[in-house]
Image (cartoon, rainbow, N blue to C red):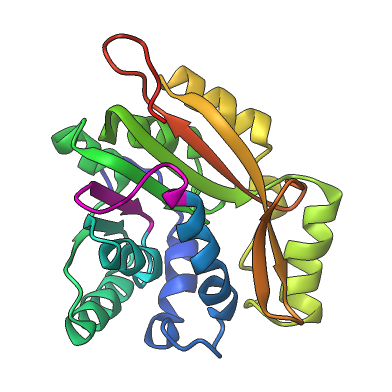
Amino acid sequence: MASTGNVDAAEIARFEAAASRWWDPEGEMRPLHELNPVRLEYVERGGPLSGKDAIDVGCGGGLLAEAMARRGARVTGLDLAPQLLKVAELHALEAGVAVTYLLESAEQHAAQHAGSYDVVTCMEMLEHVPDPARVVAALASLVRPGGHVFMSTINRTPRAYLHAVLGAEYVLRLLPSGTHTYDRFIRPSELSEWARLAGLRTLDVAGLDYDPFGRTARISGDARVNYLMHFSKPDAAGVAGR
């Protein structure tokens, strides 16, 4: 990471502490397990994954990466937490799912693999890095013309602070305390502008609602807390992928 500097060591350590329990649907990563089918559904709105080259940036223990591979994509997972990648590799091996995992940042990988992927995903990661705009630029570099980029993060609103910080971390104890920092939350308008500057077009913004009591998640029209965004890179003719 010395080549990019865009990393928070405390964030890496926090997630590595949960590495051995990442695939436990009743552990501290329970919300991710319950959000994952909805994240996959949103990605598949951009088209079938079968036969596509896909990369999941900030893949953690591999929840979304494996899900995309099961849909027939050729998947690469990137992360900067070595212990998480070991867990992801072991789980994929035991499950018989082919995923290539690499200990690299998005910026490092983009320097060698620009334009290599049909589908680029980055879920619940941007709010954990010092300079998310640089990550967005790298994601834009990784995707092929006509390809799709999907991101999810948390809106910077009082409602998001109430739900994602106070509620999830301190009241319901769904996540370890300190998982999120309100100042790092990102408004959709900010994310859209970073993407535009990187050469992407915004196709969609959707809310990602989570009910911790019913243990259900759904795509909605309310982006005040968690939200997803779908971008594309125009092809040579200036046509954005659909």
Q: Residue at x 50, y 67 (%)?
A: 37
Q: Which residue is more in the foreground, 54 or 195?
A: 54
Residue in view at x 26 percent, y 82 percent: 91
x and y, in percent, of residue 59 in the image: 36, 61
Q: Position of residue 73 (x, y in %)?
A: 23, 56
Report if residue 55 lies within the magenta region: yes
Magenta span includes 29:
no
Left or right of 100 in this view: 199:
right
Q: Is residue 215 above or below residue 116?
A: below
Q: Residue at coordinates 46% horizontally, 72% vertically from top-left?
A: 15
Point out the residue furthest to the top here.
Answer: 237
Magenta stretch, residue numbers:
43-58
* Residue at 32%, 63% in the rendered image: 65
Left or right, 215 with respect to 93, comes to right
Rendering quarter of residue 112: top left
Q: Nearer the viewer, residue 55 or 129?
A: 55
Instruction: Note whether 138 is above or below 193 in the view shown.
Output: below
The quarter of the displayed image where residue 63 is located? bottom left
Query: Residue 40: x and y, percent?
Result: 45, 59
With 57 as the anchor, is 24 left or right in this view? right
The quarter of the rendered structure image containing the C terminus is top left
Q: Is residue 208 left or right of residue 28?
A: right
How many numbered circles does the render carry?
Answer: 0
Q: Could you tell me residue 52's position as x and y percent?
A: 22, 47
Q: In this rendering, is residue 30 above or below 201?
A: below
